[in-house]
Amino acid sequence: MTRYSLAIICLGLFLCTSCVPQKDLIYLQDKGNSNDTIPSLVEQQKPYRVQINDILNIRIKVLNQENATIFNPTGEGLLEASPQERAYFDGFTVDLRGKIEIPQLGSFDVLNLTLEDIEVLVNKRLLEKEFNEFAQIFVTAKLAGLRYTTLGEINSTGSQVIFQERATILEAVANAGDIPVEGNRKAVRILRQYPHGQEIHRLDLTDINVLKSPYYYIQPNDVIIVDPLVQKSLGTGTNGLQTFTAILGVVTVVTSTILLIDRL
């Protein structure tokens, strides 16, 4: 009877514990098509609309650039600052009212506007207050980097910055050092800020259809959360050797306990 009990225990442990399967580790798998061709995917990104705490990089150029010096901070006192620090001190942060303040031009309500909208708004104010139509004004408005936060089972947690106009969730994950074997690629959560509050969206990075998701492109102030796989929580290991070692340890303890009981 003791041998049967031991066999049942070992079999139960084997069934309840396993290493991480390969299909949980591979990005962008074609799960819905039997052929080898990848279906054409349509990009879903819409123009970004500015939110509270965004940092805007606004530059103004005119025919006589000396006349526009006051509008273009240069960060002369921050020669040794990092790009992130320069962007923070030289940029225009959207306050809790959804406004930015530009010297000489005053306050602008930019909440929920696109970057092109802001360029038009600043250009119009310049013509009204500082320059005439012959000044040949050129205004550019950009985000001072895509800033987001990573939490959970990812190699680099904390605040991250990508200095480009847009970035996908895959680029954001790669920029943070990728997701380790213990991370759950099938249920990556994005905590996103909206004018009406915050929402959580889930993405399966192992499915190629994630490219169709409206949340495939990250936005400033996103929080990316990666949960651990159940294998890490159970401590059973992420590969065959680790799983075998864990099971062997449990079986050894169970066997020793049974033998001790038999001697009593």
Image (spheres, grey):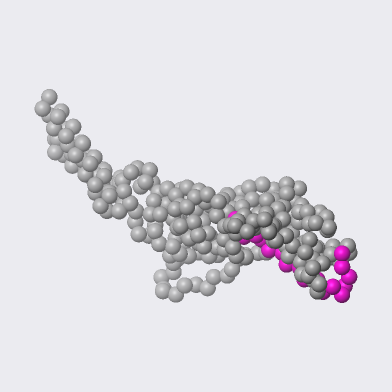
Image coordinates of residue 250 in percent, x first then y, are: 24, 40
When asked about the image quadrant of residue 142, the answer is bottom right
Does the magenta run of residues contain 219? no
Q: Quick check: 219 left or right of 111?
A: left
Give the position of the N terminus as an image quadrant. top left
Residues 147 and 69: in front is 69
Residue 38 vertical position relative to residue 264 in the rendered view, above or below: below
Q: What residue is shown at x 54% (from left), y 70% (from top)?
A: 41
Residues 65 and 117: in front is 65
Most extreme residue toward the left is 263
Q: What residue is shown at x 30% (from left), y 53% (from top)?
A: 239
Residue 66 vertical position relative to residue 99 in the rendered view, above or below: below
- The magenta-colored residue range is 130-147
Q: What residue is shown at x 47% (from left), y 52% (from top)?
A: 156
When asked about the image quadrant of residue 50, the answer is bottom right
Residues 59 and 177: in front is 59
Image coordinates of residue 94 in percent, x first then y, are: 72, 52
Give the position of the C terminus as an image quadrant. top left
Q: Quick check: 225 left or right of 145?
A: left
Residue 104 vertical position relative to residue 258 in the rendered view, above or below: below
Image coordinates of residue 144 in percent, x first then y, are: 65, 60
Image coordinates of residue 155 in percent, x first then y, are: 44, 53
- Residue 178 visible in the shown view: yes
Does the magenta run of residues contain 138? yes
- Residue 108 visible in the shown view: no
How many marks are shown on the rendered structure?
A: 0
Residue 21 vertical position relative to residue 134 in the rendered view, above or below: above
Q: What residue is shown at x 76% (from left), y 54% (from top)?
A: 100
